[in-house]
Amino acid sequence: VDDGFDTLVFWPVDPEPGQVELLAGDVVPHLRRSG
Amino acid sequence: VAAGDAETTLQFGISLVPATEKLDSIRQLVGVADEAAIDLVAIQDHPYQHHFLDTWSLISTLLAETKRISFLTDVANLPLRPPALMAKAAASLDVLSGGRFELGLGAGGIPDVIAGFGGPRRTPGESVEALEEAIDVIRLL
């Protein structure tokens, strides 16, 4: 964010619904708070 | 973007490969993302890949099947899609979806297959010039 990026796109090699749920439910909230 | 604004400005997305044989999985993942706290789905654009669905047709279909999430061409292949038509298609999708379409542009990185698919064979320098010109055209339209 400090370098000007405004979007993070996760590209899983073999995506599964659980990965998307983990990203949305765990990773994203932490990253939003850390900003 | 100021660090203090991160909570309201930072977007999160997932990138999906538009493989025809993965269509059921793509629909399932997009549905999960649409219900979750994901902002956008990014889909690459390689028209010459015989086992890929057309990215614009796929995004159009997925926009109609979802309610909240946005879609991004990641990135649209400029040598095979004239910029004026691409601008028209992008603006149309954005209006039809209530502002849920984002246009990502690419200069085209595989000259041989682009030429084999009927597009121009550009050097890296020509590709950058064409990209700059396309951005101007798209913004004018």
Image: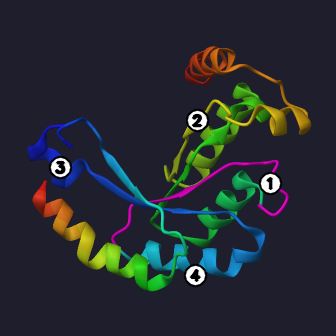
Vertical arrangement, residue A27 with respect to residue B76, above or below = below
- Using the numbered discs, state the Cα–Cα distance from disc 4 to disc 1 in whole angstroms: 22 Å
Mark 4 residue element: helix
Tag 1: residue type?
Gln
- The image quarter containing residue A5 is top left
Q: Tell if the residue under mark 4 belongs to the same chain as the one under mark 3.
A: yes
In front: mark 1 or mark 2?
1
The foreground one among B23 and B107 is: B107
Residue to which mark 1 is pinned: B49
B117 with respect to B26 (left or right) = right
- Using the numbered discs, state the Cα–Cα distance from disc 4 to disc 3 in whole angstroms: 29 Å
Residue depicted at 26% across the width and 71% down the height:
A27
Residue depicted at 77% across the width and 61% down the height:
B53
Residue to which mark 3 is pinned: B6
- Using the numbered discs, state the Cα–Cα distance from disc 1 to disc 3 in whole angstroms: 37 Å
Tag 2: residue type?
Leu
- Using the numbered discs, state the Cα–Cα distance from disc 3 to disc 2 in whole angstroms: 25 Å
Mark 3 belongs to which subunit?
A: B
Mark 2 residue element: strand
Q: Tell if the residue under mark 3 belongs to the same chain as the one under mark 2.
A: yes
Mark 4 surroundings: few (<14), some (14-19) or many (≥20) residues within 10 A: some
